[in-house]
Each structure stands twice: as C-alpha cells, then as structure tokens.
Amino acid sequence: MSEARPVGGGTSAPTVLRIILGRRLKDLRESAGVSLEGAAKALRVNSLTIRRMEKAEVGLKIPYVEKLLQTYGADKQETDEFIDLAEQANRPGWWHRYRDVLPGWFTAYVSLESDAQTLRTYEPHYVTGLLQTHAYARAILRAGFPNDSDEDLERRVDLRLRRQSLLERPDAPTLWVVMEEAVLHRLIGGAAVMREQIDRLLQAAELPNVTIDMVPFTAGAHVGAFAPFTYFRFDAPELPDVVYTELLSGAVYLEQRPDVVAHLEAHNRMSLLTSSSDSKALLNRMRKEYT
C-alpha cells in the first residue's frame, strides 16, 4: 500500500499480514546491505518486482520468498516462520467470498478494519457502517446501488453486518465515532428504521470500547467538516497509522505523517465540540422525533 494512493474499482488490495511481511522483507534486505537491484538479480527479475513485493502490491510467491531470505542470510528457523506467515498471507480474507459485491477500493479497508487496534471515524452524512442496523444499511445500500438485484443487495448488507462482529471479539478494537447531528435528521428508510437505528447507537454507546460523539448543529463551522474519514492504528510495529477517505468513485489511503496527524487532530478537535452526556441527550431527543 502506497503512502497516498487513490484506489479504483479494479485494484486488488493486500491483507494486513501481507503488508507486514512486505515491510519485513524490505527491512531484511536493507539490514543485509542488499540493493533492490541485487535482490532482483538473485530472483532473475527486475527491481520493480522486488519493490512491489515489499509494498504488498503483489502476492508473495513462496519460491521467491525462500530465495530472498537465503540471499539476506536468514537462518532456517526464521525462514520457516516467514514462509508459514507468507502462506497465511496469501490466503484470501473472510471477505473474499463477497468479492462479487465488494468494490476493489474497499477491500483494503475491510482488511485494515479487521486488524486495527484503534478506529476513529468521522461521518457527516450517515451512521458509520460498524453501527448500522440491517434495515438502515439496506436502505442506504439500495440508494447507492439502485440497479442491484435483491440477492446482490442482501449480500452487500450481509457483508456490512458481518464486519460488525469485530466489536464483539475478545480483542475488540476501540471505536471512536464522531457524527454530525445531520446524520440523525437524514430520514433513511422511514421513522421506524430511524428509531431502531438510534436505539442501536444508544446501546453501542454503553459498550466499554465504543465512544459516540454527536456534533450538534450549534457547533457551527469546524475543522473536520469536509468528507468522511477513518483513522486506523495497529499493534504491529511494521504498520504505520493509516487514514482512509472516500471519493465519489474510489478511495484514498494516506500514510504520510502530516496527512495522518492532520486528520487525527481534526478528530480530536471535533470531539471537543460535544460530550458523552450531550450526545446521548441528542440521540434520545431525536428518537422521540421518530415516534
């Protein structure tokens, strides 16, 4: 994954493990004092192939990995462990079964989301996907994919709800959501759907690993009022913090430190525009609006 890359619909995204192993390959090569050209010569390929392996832009061919580790002076135990991980990294993620309805530019998001330790999101338009109800998700996805068959639409909904299971894991990540009050006024699926969705948000707000901040209209203009984004932080030291933001027909993944810090600071500032008690009061008030 590059430092700032727009991703189109035809891109095949790597798993997080493949990203980690790519970075480890680069570290091993540099520690051994081997240039990109030297590594390429060992495999009888061009240096671009090595660069793409290190950036996790291609799968890890096991014979290539074995030869590179030999070139870098790795011992048998290190090589065996690396090969085992490479084989795991080459296996499709659970979301692969939804590839017919999963945009290529969003595949990386699902992988990052599945392995993140911390997720911070900003949503100006809709309830964040990890907290949507079935009915709310279905209404949004039907609007976004009006030509889908009912079967494809249900698969999209199923994928979205399947993603939510990460919040129930023993090692569940921390989720901090900042949403605009406008989200609650945007009528999605009718009053009953909105009431059920607000109930879901109130329940989620009670979870120890979930924080929901609702930015009220009275906050006025603020630093983050541009586009939705998600910030990811990981346990693995090989992975930097990553920010994801959407375009109309794709997405951008940012790794450059100034970009990541700008989004993190924006999230921090937006969270100061409200409080947990104020957010719950707003949710309860809006719930009454839909009775």
Image (cartoon, grey):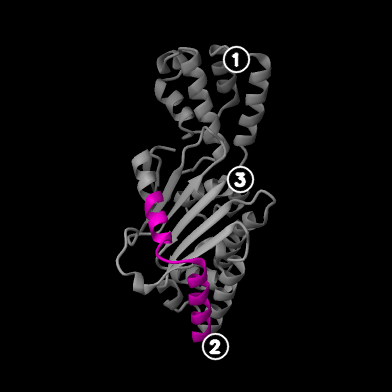
Q: Mark 3 points at which residue?
A: 93
Rendered image: mark on residue 291: 2
Placement of the C terminus among the 4 image quadrants: bottom right
Type of the residue with mark 3? Gly
Q: Nearer the viewer, residue 59 or 266?
A: 266
- Within the magenta stretch, is there residue 67? no
Q: How crowded is mark 3: few (under 14 residues within 10 Å), some or many (20 or more)?
A: some
| Residue segment shown in magenta | 264-289
Position of residue 22 measured from the top left corner of the image (x, y, whole percent): 51, 29
Q: Which of marks 3 and 1 is in front?
A: 1
Picture residue at 61% right of the left edge, 30% below the top: 86
- For the residues labelled 2 and 3, say whether their Cβ atoms are less than 8 Å apart: no
Answer yes or no: is residue 101 visible: no
Q: Mark 1 points at which residue?
A: 74
Answer yes or no: is residue 226 visible: yes
Residue 153, picture quadrant: bottom right
Q: Which of marks 1 and 2 is in front?
A: 2
Q: Which of 50 and 222 is in front in this view?
A: 222
**In the rendered structure, which disc, 2 or 3, sits on the residue that comes first in sequence?**
3
Residue 69, picture quadrant: top right
Q: Nearer the viewer, mark 2 or mark 3?
A: 2
Q: How crowded is mark 1: few (under 14 residues within 10 Å), some or many (20 or more)?
A: some
- Within the magenta stretch, is there residue 283? yes
Type of the residue with mark 2? Thr
Q: Kindly state the secondary structure of the residue where label 1 is placed.
A: loop
